[in-house]
Image (tube, rainbow, N blue to C red):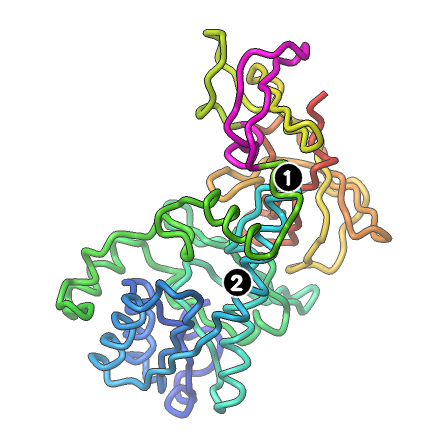
Amino acid sequence: MTLTDRRPHDAVRTQRVLVGVSGGVDSAVTCLLLKTAGYHVSGAFLMTHDNADAARYDAEKLCRQLSIDFFPIDVRALFQQTVIDPFVDAWLAGYTPNPCVICNPSLKFDVLLETARRNQFDWIATGHYAAIERIEQTGRFALKKVTDGYKDQTYFLYRLNQDQLQHIMFPLGGYAKEEVRRIAARHNLVDQKGDQLALKQDSQDICFLPDKNYVQMIREEAIRRSLANADRLLEPGPIVNCDGEQIGTHTGLAYYTFGQRKGFNVKTTDRLFVVDRNLDNRQLTVGPYERVMQSKIRVTDIVFSGVDSFNEGEAMSGRIRSSAKPAPCRVYPNQDKNEIIVHFDEPVSAPTPGQSCVFYREQTILAGGLIDYNGVMTG
């Protein structure tokens, strides 16, 4: 949405918006744009883990600079229960989960909306690059990709429910990232150290793993929770080719995902990719690129957005990772099991179990779900 397509401008003066602030440039400019448009803006910082102090101070500094109220909210226990525990459990079950997909609907937007309602706010907002539209034919709210060439984050937001979508603003949906940086520079937005937010690099890390060492975190969590099955993924085992011949040894299945090409030493010069992980015998199977190309996958735990159901054989596009372009496909739903069999028109590269497949029609999200391990055909 833009700042003007939800309510007439003369109503803005009385409307209150709670913005999720992170200490970065996107949420900072979100606050600035909303305040400039006449909304009564406050910032809420979600303390999700013990290493978030620097980000909190940056967020608090921003709120002081813009003369808006600051709400620090400690959600560390909830984050552990809602995000970290399922993340670890999924890894130990052999999946490759995306924590942002879990966090956005179940924690971030849920807590923001609950806090907003408790404190009589009209809206919540974040610095995501996305848009929201209301589908006239269905009356449902749906996420919409921003214009091609702009940064798009709809893939990470597809599990937001209807109640959340109708109370969210995404003011950056119509902006390019460089334009956001220029706005921040023009208004001299700074962090706690006085450094320009416009020059702050985008985070490429999982927020609770700044050093990207997720295997070490999984090991520590497995010990803390006494998870006996952790050894299956954290101990060395054989690497075999598609004929079952051992050609090397890996350091632990947790280091590898479906379609991965680097990170293993084998006795061959062939260009090989991970095509299977056997948790029972700790065996990693590698093979040629064509073995990771898939035409059919199973998608489970479906969340509908722009529509409330699919027809048998309905045509649309499926996006199997955030960096992938949506690919033409047809869907075959099994409503009893809340799953969909997806047939792509052309094979797609390495649809990874635990990642999401998000379904689009043109720019609009229709639904999405989790790629199931049994749906990846590696044989």
359 sits to left or right of 145? right
* Label whose residue precedes the other's in the sequence (1 or 2): 1
Q: Few, some or many C-alpha atoms within 10 Å of disc 2 (few <14, some 14-19, many ≥20)? A: some
Image quarter in which the C terminus is found:
top right
Residue that appears at 42% across and 57% down: 208
Instruction: Say whether residue 346 is visible.
Output: no
- x, y (%) of residue 33? 30, 73
Q: Nearer the viewer, residue 201 or 348?
A: 201
The kind of residue on which mark 1 rests is Gly
Q: Measure the alpha-carbon separation of dots 1 and 2.
A: 23 Å
Please tell me which residue is depicted at 65% across the width and 13% down the height of the picture: 242
The residue indicated by pointer 1 is 94
136 above or below 70?
A: above
**Image point 48% across, 80% down: which residue?**
123
Viewer-nearest residue: 100 or 360:
100
Q: Position of residue 343 (x, y in %)?
A: 72, 33
Element on which disc 1 rests: loop
The residue indicated by pointer 2 is 104
Secondary structure at numbered mark 2: helix
The span shown in magenta is 234-259
- Is 336 placed above or below 21 here? above
Q: Position of residue 78 (x, y in %)?
A: 55, 70
Q: Write the residue at 56% across / 11% down.
A: 247
Type of amino acid at the residue the image marks with label 2: Asn
